Amino acid sequence: MPNHIILSGKTVSTAVYEQLQPRIDRLKAKGIVPGLGVILVGDDPASQVYVNSKARRFKKLGLNSQTWSASSSISEQELVKLINGYNSNNNVHGILIQSPLPKHLDYNKILLNVDPHKDVDGFHPVNVGKLTLGTPQFIPCTPKGVMRILEHYEIEIEGKNVVVIGRSNIVGRPLSILTSLKQKYSNATTTICHSGTTDIPSVARQADILIAAIGVPEMIDETYVKEGAVIIDVGINRVEDDSEKGYKLVGDVNFDSIQNKVSAITPVPGGVGPMTIAMLVENTIEAAELSMSS
Ligand code: GUN
C-alpha cells in the first residue's frame, strides 16, 4: 500500500461552501444576491466546460451568474462595451473574462477595463500589485485554492523549500508570491522554475513542497521528486483516449511513477480543480460584501 495522504480538493471545497453559507445568508438578508458576470469568447471546449461548471455551482448555492458568450471575431471595442456593462451593473459583483482569448485580443490590455473592485480573478494590475505588497484584495482563485488545501491539511510551509514549476500569471507567479509572503501559512523559501531553467529536476528535488503548474501531461516523474515531498498537481490536461468522451483528464504529474515516494499528493481530478471554483465563489462573496461598504 502506498504510504501517502491524498489531499482532496473535493473535501476542502465542501468545507469552504459550508463556511460561506452564513456570509451568503447575511448578504441575502440585506437584499444582496452575490452575482458573477462571465465573458466567454470563442468556442474552446475546455473553456466552455469550465464556465458551465462555474455557473452550475453558483446556481446550486442560490447565487447569480450570467455569461456573455461572444463570437471569436468580436472586436476589442465590443468586448470593452460588454465589460463596461458589467462594471455598471449593481447586480454583478464579480467579473471573469475566461482565458485564453483569441489571438487578436490582448488579455492584459482588455483586463485594464475591469473595475478592480469586481476583479474576482485577481488578475488586474491593481490586485496583482496589492498581492505583491502583501496586502491582497482579491487573490487569484487557483493559487488561493492551493494555499487553502495546504492549510486544511495543516501542511506547514514556513521555512520549507517550495518549488513552483511554471510562471504563468494565472497560477505559477501568484503562487511564488503567496508562498513567500512574510505571514502565517507562508514564509517559505520559494524557487520558481520555467522554460529558462537549465536543470528543472535537480531544482525540483530540493522541494519539500513541489507545485506543478506547467500544462504538460504527466511531465513530473520520480526524477523530479525528493523522498517524502508534498506534491501539488495544478495541471488539468486533456489526453485523447478511446473512451466515449474521446479523452481523459490527467495532471502534470505522473501519479503512478511518484506515489510511493511522496508523503502527500493532490489527485487529478478532485484535487486543485474543485478549489478554483470554491475560491471564485469566495471572491465573489467578498466582492459583494465590498460593494456594501462603498
Ligand atoms: N483559464 C484557466 N483558468 C482560469 C481562471 O482561473 N480564470 C480565468 N478567467 N480564466 C482561466
Image: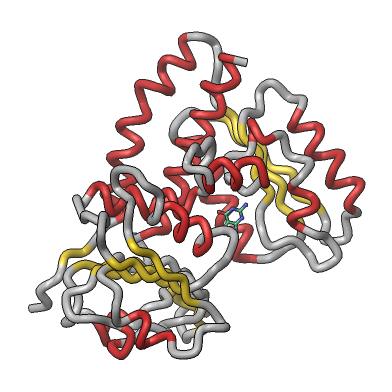
Q: Quadrant of the C terminus?
A: top right
Q: Quadrant of the N terminus?
A: bottom left
Residue 70 in view, yes or no: yes
Task: Dividing the image into four quarters, tell me where ligand 1 lies.
Answer: bottom right
> From what the image shows, is residue 31 above or below residue 3?
above
Q: Residue at x 60, y 20 (%)?
A: 291
Image coordinates for residue 104, horizontal then vertical, percent? 86, 65
**For the image shown, how many numbered marks are present on the structure?**
0
Direction from residue 262 to residue 110 in the image, left or right = right
Image coordinates for residue 100, horizontal then vertical, percent? 69, 62
Direction from residue 70 to residue 251 in the image, left or right = left
Q: Residue at x 63, y 39 (%)?
A: 119
Quarter holding residue 61: top left
Quarter holding residue 122: top right
Quarter holding residue 67: top right
Residue 56 in view, yes or no: no
Q: Residue at x 17, y 75 (%)?
A: 228
Image coordinates for residue 267, horizontal then vertical, percent? 31, 67
Q: Residue 115 versus residue 103: which sits nearer the camera?
A: 115
> From what the image shows, is residue 144 above or below residue 3?
above
Image coordinates for residue 251, horizontal then vertical, percent? 41, 74
Q: Residue at x 34, y 60 (%)?
A: 270
- The image's colouring method is secondary structure
> From what the image shows, is residue 250 above or below residue 29?
below
